[in-house]
Amino acid sequence: MAKSVAVLVTNLVEDVEYTEPVEALKSAGHEVTTISFEKGTVEGKHGTQINVDKSIDEVRPQDFDALFIPGGFSPDQLRADQRFVEFTKFFLATNKLTTSICHGPQLMIQTGLVQGRTMTAYLTVQPDLYYAGARIEDKAVVIDGNLITSREPKDIPAFNEAFLAAL
């Protein structure tokens, strides 16, 4: 059964951390909605043009089955905007499927809801998660209930497999 997945991005997202999981989701028949500050396009760190389907003001988290936050510099920018923090917080607080790779968990830290969760992230983000109260495992994919996190681009195949299995 097809699920609806919200993807939060802005400029300087890590290209393959967006494109490869989104392609896997769509290939499996899931509906992906790319969300940013406004509709239009954003540009990945390596120049990929990404179509934005909806602005954050046009969506409600309860209308989606899952959340995906790719890495790069995008999550650090998004976490400065309370609308994206609240959107992410809804998924964590209601135990809806929440997924992230690389720097993506930076946005989750801002919610105040990573304490006690088992997670992974890019090497430099792992201490931030630890200081926010998360348990860190340095593995390709860490699954803690409905929370799936991954470290970096080389982990994308394992991340995609876990994400699709959870859906």
Image: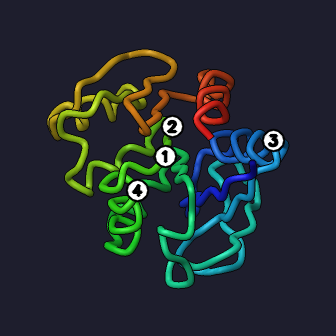
**Helix, strand, or loop for circle 3?**
loop
Q: Which residue is mark 2?
A: 101
Nearer the observer, disc 2 or disc 4?
4
Residue at image point 26% right, 57% down: 111
N-term-proximal mark, 2 vs 4: 4
Q: Quadrant of the C terminus?
A: top right
N-term-proximal mark, 1 vs 3: 3
Give the distance between the C-alpha atoms of the residues marked 2 and 1, in whole angstroms. Answer: 14 Å
**Helix, strand, or loop for circle 1?**
strand
N-term-proximal mark, 3 vs 2: 3
Give the distance between the C-alpha atoms of the residues marked 4 and 1, in whole angstroms. Answer: 7 Å
Q: Are marks 1 and 3 in contact (CB under 8 Å)?
A: no
Q: Which residue is mark 3?
A: 28
Give the distance between the C-alpha atoms of the residues marked 3 and 2, in whole angstroms. Answer: 19 Å
User: Going by the image, does 39 lie left or right of 62?
Assistant: right
Q: Residues within 10 Å of mark 2 (few under 14, many from 20)?
A: many
**Helix, strand, or loop for circle 2?**
strand
- The amino acid at mark 4 is Phe
Residue at image point 23% right, 37% down: 128
Give the distance between the C-alpha atoms of the residues marked 4 and 3, in whole angstroms. Answer: 22 Å
* Farthest front residue in view: 1
Q: Which residue is mark 4?
A: 91
**Helix, strand, or loop for circle 4?**
helix
Q: Are marks 4 and 1 in contact (CB under 8 Å)?
A: yes
Q: Which residue is mark 1?
A: 97
- The amino acid at mark 1 is Leu
- The amino acid at mark 3 is Ala
Q: Quadrant of residue 11?
A: bottom right
Q: Residues within 10 Å of mark 3 (few under 14, many from 20)?
A: some
N-term-proximal mark, 4 vs 1: 4
